[in-house]
Image (cartoon, rainbow, N blue to C red):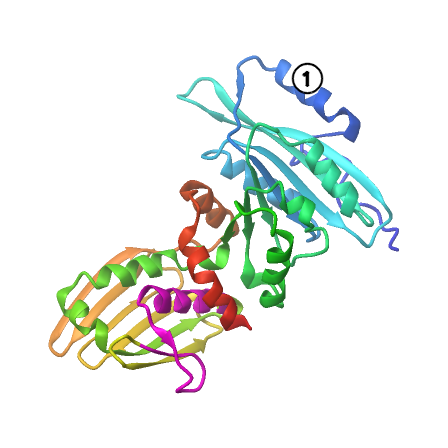
Amino acid sequence: MSTLPSPIPDFCPELGIEIPVSDIDKELRKLWEQDEASTNASLMNLVVFSEKPNSLIENSGIIRELTREHACRAILVEIDSAAEPHIRAWITAHCHLAEGKKSVCCEQISFYLTGRVTGRFRNTVFAHLNSDLPLVFWWQGELSDILTERLVSVIDRLIIDSSSWANPAASFRMIEENSQFNDDLIIQDHAWTRSFQFRIGIASLFDDPTAKTALPGIHMVEITYHPDHRNSALQILAWLATQAKWNDCECADGFAYRSNSGVVISTILRADPASAPLSSLVLRAEAATVQVTYEIGASHLQKQVEAGSYKATSLSPADPTSPAELVGLQLARGGKNSLYQKILPRFRAMLD
């Protein structure tokens, strides 16, 4: 085992006051007693888990921004399983002005755990949840054996980024196995959220009568994506096939479908290292081409319907790409994420 010193300095204002784990509740009470002008606000427990070195400080900055719009009790956890067993803890509050007067503050508890921590992690987190509030669990990076059935059983909303996984098929199986007794678990995937405006854009284009007329004749789907974000491309393809009621077809190489009108629909998935996570979605029919494109750095998506001499273009907002912005959107939208659940079986079949 490694005996390297903790990478977090003894004095770390980004995380607040370092305290013994046994004193967390007492010190939190003292924190609020010191400032009677502050209001403690929480609508959820938000646990942010990472095994990435130095993630605690980075995630504390993210929570500072998230709490401007989403009141929560935040519990940040960084784990280093290679070091000797140890635990450090900090508390702080992120405060924001309400109507220019009273501060509205959200608690943050941070833990740095080392060594084998499966049981210690679960017990540490469980002991400091606000039991009256739902649990949103943001798992950063690859899944590990820390994601147990007992942990998943108390999670209301699991935020993941399947694009960061080396083996997405195995990771989704792991979630399925550990959530078999939690039928109410809601999964929110950054890979899916990154495609939101693309999906809205392509759907809105079919309000155009020319595009709507061409819909039954679509015979080609082309998606250009960054190599790190293949899952976003597959999910948007699964969405198209599911919503358009295309049937899987083994009539061509790669992914292919057959429409209800009997048209064979081929697909081209094009990985481009210079691309945004998603940069182009093109649907081709005999009579028309419908497409949504995005250039890195642009503030909007470009939408276009083209049929012979007819050409209609428009703009729509671009999808965010940073983890903090994606989580902010996911928390703001809430809901059951039923459309993702609907396309998930088809997407997982693509992975297999």
User: Residue 271: where, in percent of width, then height?
Assistant: 47, 76
- Location of residue 74 by image quarter: top right
User: Residue 152: where, in percent of width, then height?
Assistant: 63, 46
95 or 186: nearer the viewer: 186
- Residue placed at 68% from the left, 17% from the top? 30
- Location of residue 317 by image quarter: bottom left
Q: Is residue 246 magenta?
A: yes
Q: Mark 1 points at which residue?
A: 30
Dot 1 amino acid type: Lys
Secondary structure category for the residue under label 1: helix
143 or 149: nearer the viewer: 149
> Where are the magenta residues, as a range?
230-258
Q: Is residue 48 magenta?
A: no
- Residue placed at 79% from the left, 52% from the top? 81
Residue 231 is left or right of residue 92, and the answer is: left
User: Residue 44: where, in percent of width, then height?
Assistant: 54, 33
Instruction: Determine if residue 194 is in view.
Output: no
253 or 319: nearer the viewer: 253
- Residue placed at 63% from the left, 66% from the top? 170
Instruction: Tell me: residue 240, above or below residue 46.
Output: below
Residue 307 is left or right of residue 324, and the answer is: left
310 or 332: nearer the viewer: 332
